[in-house]
Image: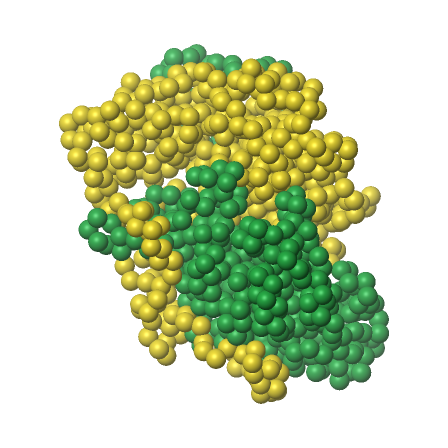
Amino acid sequence: MYPYLPITSEDRRRMLQAVGVEAIEELFVDIPSVMRCKGRLNLPGPLSEMEMARHMKALAGKNKNLDDNPCFLGAGAYDHYVPSIINHILLRQEFYTAYTPYQPEVSQGTLQAFFEYQTMICELTGMEVSNASVYDGASALAEAVAMACQATRRGEVLLSRAVHPEARQVVKTYSHFSSVNVKELGYQNGLTGAGEAEELINNQTSAIVVQNPNFFGALEELAKFAELAHRHKALLIVSADPIALGLLKPPGESGADIVVGEGQPLGNPLSFGGPYFGFMATTEKLMRRLPGRIVGQTADSEGNRGFILTLQAREQHIRREKATSNICSNQALCALAAAVYLTVLGKKGLRQVAELCLQKAHYTYRSLLETGKFASTFTAPFFKEFAVTGQEDAAVVNARLMENKIIGGYPLARDYPELKNALLIAVTENRTRDEIDRLVKYSVAT
Amino acid sequence: MELIFEQSVPGRTGISLPAIDVPEEAIESLIPAEYLRRESPGLPEVSEGEAARHFTRLSRRNFGVDTGFYPLGSCTMKYNPKVNEDIARLNGFTRVHPYQSEDTVQGCLELLYHMDRCLSELTGMARVSLQPAAGAHGELTGLMMMKAYHENRGEGHRKKIIVPDSSHGTNPASAQMAGLKLVEIKSGKNGRLDLDELKKAVDGQVAGIMLTNPNTLGLFESDIAEIAEIVHSAGGLLYNDGANANAILGISTPGDMGFDVVHLNLHKSFAAPHGGGGPGSGPVGVKEHLAPFLPKPLVEIKGDGSYYLEYNRPLSIGKVRSFYGNFGVVVKAYAYILTMGPEGLRQAAEDAVLNANFLMKRLKDYYDLPYDQVCKHEFVLSGGRQKEKGVNTEDIAKRLLDYGYHPPTVYFPLIVKEALMIEPTETENLETLERFIEAMIQIAGEVDEEPEKVRLAPHTTVVGRLDAVKAARKPVLRWKP
């Protein structure tokens, strides 16, 4: 018996009779017999709920989790604290079992939450318009590049090597197939080379793409890139860390035209890489080129305020091959988590979290340098993440840390062979001084 | 209802944070002043209790699968098992960083590896990538691989992609993003692909065809063997939009039908929740000849039984998303497969098809049924008869809200006028189906007797019918004080 299948054999008999067939087989006669599965499929199960849960708990138990092993890994996914309330809201069936809000009269909950989310993203980024989220930060960046190329009718993009390596790979994959030419900009002292950008930009450049704080954790001079891009009638795309925006000037104020980012830090667990969400915001001028779901305010016939999916003339179900993107979902529940997160943190809480990250990261940085075994890889200002270069291979350092139940940093040589022995260390508000001191202690060979 | 911003009072907060436990430095000494925000972002200021009440009130303005019957065609709104929510929230799954060393994430890798095996078996494919985050994302990934396959064979000129006019809107949009050229062909009179039209469209430029099977009318493309022969012999490939896989899981596989690539929607066929529009998961499976082009990494197993991430895949299209996809959604779907087993999945498909045929049979006297034949997991009615009486399909959909049902998918597929696409799924019982039939019959009666009541529906929802034109003409997309 299957707990999710309510139709009984007696029901089946009655229903088959009503349909006018004798056996269920008759409802499948249109599938040629050569195409029918023969024999039992090679799949596990069926398991009872108890057996399944036991099996899954055993699998989960094979992983080393962050509750037992303080984590200094970041590199695009961060161990920020997730307040309890978020999960309780996400587990409301009205939110998690609902479909995309196509029927607004019975979806005001989701729609209003997206409207609030969009407002919050505009506030964080300093942009005028936000969509209701896309798959993740990396695909958001790829969508932003496509959007910039459509808006400027140009086919080239300047992509900083200080942008997350995986995000660059996703941009390159999307761009290869849509025939967009991606040119990479090198970095100096951990910052995107402005001189190189100046040399490479031309009348085919649709956008300059930078990340802030960048993959190395360092803070870019956004206004300089905005000025350069705009001088050549190109756009500036910024990928931002949303927690940093509690403290840093919004990219919109520095002249960004499209701001995207990985939304995971806003109340979403690490979950081995997903589900996360990408946020995506732009100017009013570019509003109609934005991909994805967008919620707008309207009214019913009696003048009651209500919310509805809008500007759908951009979307695939209306425009088919002329749509701005093929995307037809958002990461609704992850965006809802972000809205609840930003609500409970509020104006002051987000800034406090950002300050905790900043202070703890700088304390860690100073402590590591004081050991004499690590040197700064770069000297540019940073927020919650930084690179240090050690005297041993990063893997050796990390293995020693793991023996002491600490998850160490990201070995930068994995993507930047020139950065031998460099570790990228992230410190969030979730790390205590004691954990940091242990990191420092075991980072050094005894 | 008030927005959270309208409830904000300066000085309130919903969080308590620890004091700074490390020596502090002046912020301006760490970050140049010109990089700092002058004003805090305009976030709401409310207590935790106020936040809880606000979002709970919002949730009560939503309709979920546990609220009532949700016969939304092509969306497979089946019951989402509660235990799977708990399993995906185990700290051994949620509190794991994607860049931890492989020896510390063996549980995650083992799960991904076995999910690849399970989905390969269910689709008749060689390998499956779990990286795409949604169905449309899977489509894009699949098309990219098809293009890469042709390019690698020195046939990069193959850019033509054929889709039937009954296809999901994502199909043409994905083709466009993959840099392919779209050729749309008309469906035949029986609601299936027209072989003559197909033969006309196929030539040496063809990269492939995208087909949903069963198609969006809920009909199985029984000529699929011949379709595959026509496309393959011209050097093209077959892509299966697996949105409708719930009808065939355990009964037939896209592989046996001749497809080269397929995507599945774990949030449809495999009972992971839709989340109000996501997160979903759109794994894409391919046969052996396309496997080298799958996104990287794939999870592989070593001789000693340990698992690892294989990045060394020189022909791979690269990455379509960061990390390894929507892992948490994959966990729920894997738990579902374990619970159902092969017999359970087959039973689910049979019951889904039986439920659909039962509804279709009982409703066809009251609504037009343009394609009156055995259906699979869904079928498409037309409100044409009602339209003639001045009541359109949208009115009928809105009237269903008053009866406590989520409406079917409406105005899709485009080839049926006033379409009502109904998919009951296997998790609905006979009593629910009977009550829904009763409601549909009553509404058909109302169209004759009290058409105004239907035209002005809904009458019982928290807001009335909303003005979509106003929303799009002068967009208000954020709150302003």
Apparent side of residue B4 relative to residue B182 in the rendered image (left or right): left
Who's the residue at 63% across and 64% down the image?
A210
Q: Position of residue B161 (x, y in %)?
A: 60, 30
The image quarter containing residue B392 is top left
- Which image quadrant: the C terminus of chain B? bottom left
The image quarter containing residue A185 is bottom right
In-front residue for pair A5/B292? B292
Apparent side of residue A88 relative to residue B301 in the rendered image (left or right): left
Q: How is the image coloured?
A: by chain
Is residue A66 in sight in this rendering?
no
Apparent side of residue B74 relative to residue B364 in the rendered image (left or right): right
Q: Residue furthest left?
A: B449
Who's the residue at 73% across and 43% down the image?
B316
Is residue A233 in sight in this rendering?
yes
Who's the residue at 58% across and 72% down the image?
A223
Which hue is chain A drawn in? green
| Residue B68 drawn above or below residue A208 | above
Which chain identifier belongs to the yellow chain?
A: B
| Residue B225 drawn above or below residue B12 | above
Q: Position of residue B328 (x, y in %)?
A: 57, 50
- Which image quadrant: the N terminus of chain B? bottom left
Apparent side of residue B211 relative to residue A27 in the rendered image (left or right): right
In-front residue for pair B300/A332? A332
Q: Position of residue A328 (x, y in %)?
A: 49, 44
Total residue callouts? 0
The image quarter containing residue A435 is bottom right
In-front residue for pair A165/B194? B194
Who's the residue at 77% across and 33% down the image?
B154
Q: Position of residue A175 (x, y in %)?
A: 65, 48
| Residue A159 drawn above or below residue A313 | below
